[in-house]
Image (cartoon, helix red, strand yellow):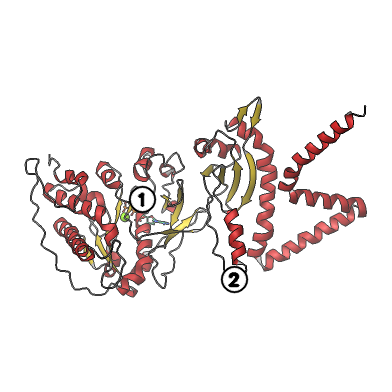
Amino acid sequence: MWFVVPYLLWQVAKATVRLMPVLWRNRTSVTLAALAVWLWHRHGWEVLALVAGVAGATVGVWWWQWRPWCERFVVLPALSWWQRLFVYQLHWREAMTVCRLAERFDGKLNVPRLLRVRCTYATDEVVLRMPRGQNPDDYHAAAANLAYSFGARICRVYSGRRDMPPTRRGRWAWLLRLVDRVRYRDRPRVVWLVFVRRDPLRRTVPAFDVPETTDLEALPLGLREDLVRYVLRLLATHVLIVGATRAGKGSVQWSLIRALAPAIRSGLVRLWGIDPKGGVELSLGRQLFSRYEYATVPPMVAMLEELVAVMRERQARMQGKTRAHTPTLDEPLYVLMVDEILALVALLQDVDLRTRAKAALAMLLTQGAGLGVLVVGATQDPRKEVVELRDFFPTRIALRLNEPNHVDLVLGQGSRARGALCDQLSARPSMRGIGYVVLDDRPEPERVRFAYVTDDEIRDMAVAYAAPEVVKPKPAPIPRQGRHTNKQKHTAGPLLPDSLAGLLDEDPA
Ligand SMILES: Nc1ncnc2c1ncn2[C@@H]1O[C@H](COP(=O)(O)OP(=O)(O)OP(=O)(O)O)[C@@H](O)[C@H]1O
Ligand SMILES: [Mg+2]
């Protein structure tokens, strides 16, 4: 019988080693349970009830007096603990198996490992490690099933951390930076699932205060689902905003203008506006625009060509000196805002004007970003003519769209599968201004509610941050572009790439 002893010892050691990580992951529950059992055993249930009552009262006072701290250190950790134990851990194995995310190997079922649950008031962030043989796309495909399995309507899947390492300052910054390097390291096998318990973007986001100075690298436009501000990096990018009628494109445009306002007043940014819908959208803030056209089409097209001329002049000045433009008062950043880009590139009846508009826009989009001439275009309909230009807009924002296939047309192939459900956004007036954006560092689109700038705020802003009077730039002579046909081959000069020269040679019919 003596040989059974080492075998038993071996089994006990193995079980202990396996139990350690489970105990560590559930350390709060284990500690609380052990404490409760000890109190009950040692002093009886009356003392246990007294301690529980005193703890409850302390939390109550804390909540009453210092609510944010209490939420951060007690309420949300307690909620996370509850959700982990009774929502996720309890049904984890079953849900993963029926959602086909458990892999069988060598007769053993490998279930994704639940690492952490962190709750906010609106969402549960569940971190898991994938078994071998999977990639985040498997979770994107199973997102809807996962959501309903755990009693939520929406589950978003992220293949990377959503937060960036904090900026560390002070004496121990070097140590904290070292810790962050480990905490924020790239972990390809880890996936973040965010279950939306209640929509954090239900309420209208009021307009942000006009900043002291404009940071062109981070213009605050709205709130993300994790209630972090969504900031746009405008330098060297064109922006395309697509949304069905009354989806709230105006709130994107005006939030952007609001963030630019100090730079507009100082002359660092020159805002040009084209409002083909008769000035309905942009005329409220007319004073903010250095140039503005809304009434008839020929001046709008002439304005586009004038901006091309400005860009060419700048290009000539920059040649051999620098490769990237930095905005200064002498060489400001030009931002051209076009409210309905479709009206210029598709709906125009006059073929000559349409061709000129397309050519000028194509020039601005292909060359302007590095030269400090940017285009912010909005449209209701991602139809062929817009999709042709889509790839020249590095930043795209999709609000509510009418068709599911429009999502991929605007944000790029596979965006809807990765969670951009623009066609499912509510058309209710109270839910306008919500859309999806693709952030630089992540393939998954982010849901954003753009800040709503009221008419009064626009009027006040237009008075307080009016653009300085500018001497109208003398346009460089542009070769007159007549009516182009296939027979009349267009020679656009070295600025226009071959892929776009075709736009000019389009058959007018
Ligand atoms: N961010 C927002 N938050 C709350 N409500 C909004 C928001 N944006 C827009 N709205 C509401 O929706 C209405 C329509 O918005 P807006 O004019 O911006 O839409 P649009 O997409 O520009 O429409 P159109 O295609 O007709 O130009 C606004 O009058 C406002 O009441
Ligand atoms: Mg509009």
Picture quarter containing residue 183?
bottom right
Q: Is residue 64 depicted above or below 162 in this figure?
A: below
Question: Which residue sits at x=59%, y=66%?
Answer: 173
Q: Is residue 461 visible?
A: no
Q: Which residue is mark 1?
A: 396
Q: Is residue 405 shown left or right of residue 116? A: left
**What separation in Å lies between label 2 and label 1 (alpha carbons)?**
39 Å
> Residue 156's spot in the image, x, y percent?
52, 44
Question: In what quadrant of the picture does the C terminus appear?
Answer: top left
To which quarter of the image does residue 369 belong?
bottom left
Are the two marked residues, 2 and 1, in contact with CB atoms closer than 8 angstroms?
no
Q: Which residue is mark 2?
A: 170
Q: Is 174 located above or below residue 392 in the figure?
A: below
For image coordinates 18% across by 45% down, the residue present is: 503
Q: Nearer the viewer, mark 2 or mark 1?
A: 2
Please state which amino acid type lies under the numbered disc 2.
Answer: Gly
Q: Position of residue 294 (x, y in %)?
A: 21, 60
Along the viewing direction, whichever of 114 and 20 lies nearer the viewer: 20
Residue 241 at x, y percent in the picture: 34, 52
Badge 2 or badge 1: first in the primary sequence: 2
Query: In the visual, does 199 lie left or right of 238?
Result: right
Is residue 370 visible in this depiction of the protein? yes
Ligand number 2: quarter of image: bottom left
Percent across and percent down for residue 254 are 35, 62
Residue type at mark 1: give it.
Arg
Q: The N terminus lies in which quarter of the figure? A: top right
